[in-house]
Amino acid sequence: MSASTAASKRRARDRAERAPSPFGLFLKGFVKNPVMVGAIVSSSQYTVRKVLDRVDWDNCKLFVEYGPGVGTFSKPILDRLAPDGKLVVIDTNPDFIRYLKQTIEDPRFSAVLGSAADVKQIVNDHGFEHADFIASGLPFSTLPPGVGDKIASETRAILREGGAFLVYQYNPSVKNFLTPHFSNIDHAMEWRNVPPAQLWWAWKD
């Protein structure tokens, strides 16, 4: 291991030690704004693996994540992402964005404080015309009126052909937000999650 790599890992470890605990921060976020967080615990490793298994990692240069929380999906995405890939996460909670910037030191990673409804502008600001895959744990059914539909519409618009919108939810009504914009949608359940998770892959044909 080079001296610079070792120093980088020490800095990341020091920042992680100063950061609040992931569970405490996630619980705080839920209590503070349950409409946007939607759950009191992070997704299970089984949910993460099942959602990401369908990603074409060989053809993924830009991955976008909505509502990254404490990085439950972000870190596994970076583990799978190509060396020249990019992960952009978007969250309206400044506590989560601050935590992710403290605990993830990776040149491929960018955390943005903002709304998923502005994904086109955010993607363009990072030098891309399209995203290859977009994942979301946002609770569509509890978002303010019109916001969920706008996010779904803007997501389809910014995805490349053959890309997909990966959605993990606890309420099956999320399909109502996807079907007006995506004609090819796959569905599965992951029971090893609290609560059991509804998984959706909406493909842009």
Image (spheres, helix red, strand yellow):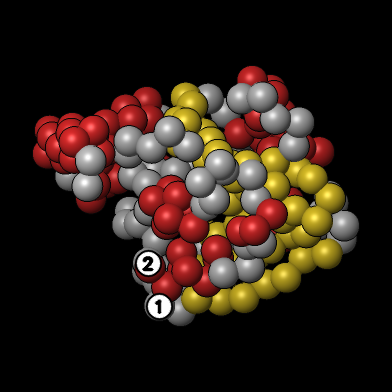
- In the image, residue 75 sits, relative to residue 4, either above or below, namely below
From the viewer's side, name the closer residue of 69 and 164: 164
| Quadrant in which residue 150 is drawn | top right
- In the image, residue 115 sits, relative to residue 169, either above or below, namely above
Q: Is the residue marked by circle 1 packed among few (<14), some (14-19), or many (20+) residues within 10 Å?
A: few
Look at 44% across and 43% down and name the residue there.
68
Residue holding disc 2: 44
Cα gap from disc 1 to disc 2, whole angstroms: 7 Å
Instruction: Report the amino acid beneath label 2.
Output: Ser
Instruction: Report the amino acid beneath label 1.
Output: Arg
| Quadrant in which residue 12 is drawn | top left
Q: Residue 87 appears at what percent x and percent y?
A: 52, 40
In this view of the protein, can residue 104 be seen by the observer? Answer: yes
In the picture, measured across the screen, residue 183 lies left or right of residue 87, that is right
Look at 74% across and 59% down and name the residue there.
202
**How many numbered marks appear?**
2
Q: Residue 22 appears at what percent x and percent y?
A: 24, 47
Indicate which disc, 1 or 2, sits on the residue closer to the N terminus.
Answer: 2
From the viewer's side, name the closer residue of 62 and 45: 62
In the picture, measured across the screen, residue 69 lies left or right of residue 152, that is left
Contact (Cβ within 8 Å) of mark 1 with mark 2: yes
Q: Is the residue marked by circle 2 packed among few (<14), some (14-19), or many (20+) residues within 10 Å?
A: some
Look at 47% across and 24% down and name the residue there.
113
Q: Residue 65 appears at what percent x and percent y?
A: 54, 44
Residue holding disc 1: 192
Q: Quadrant of the C terminus?
A: bottom right
Look at 32% across and 35% down and name the residue there.
105
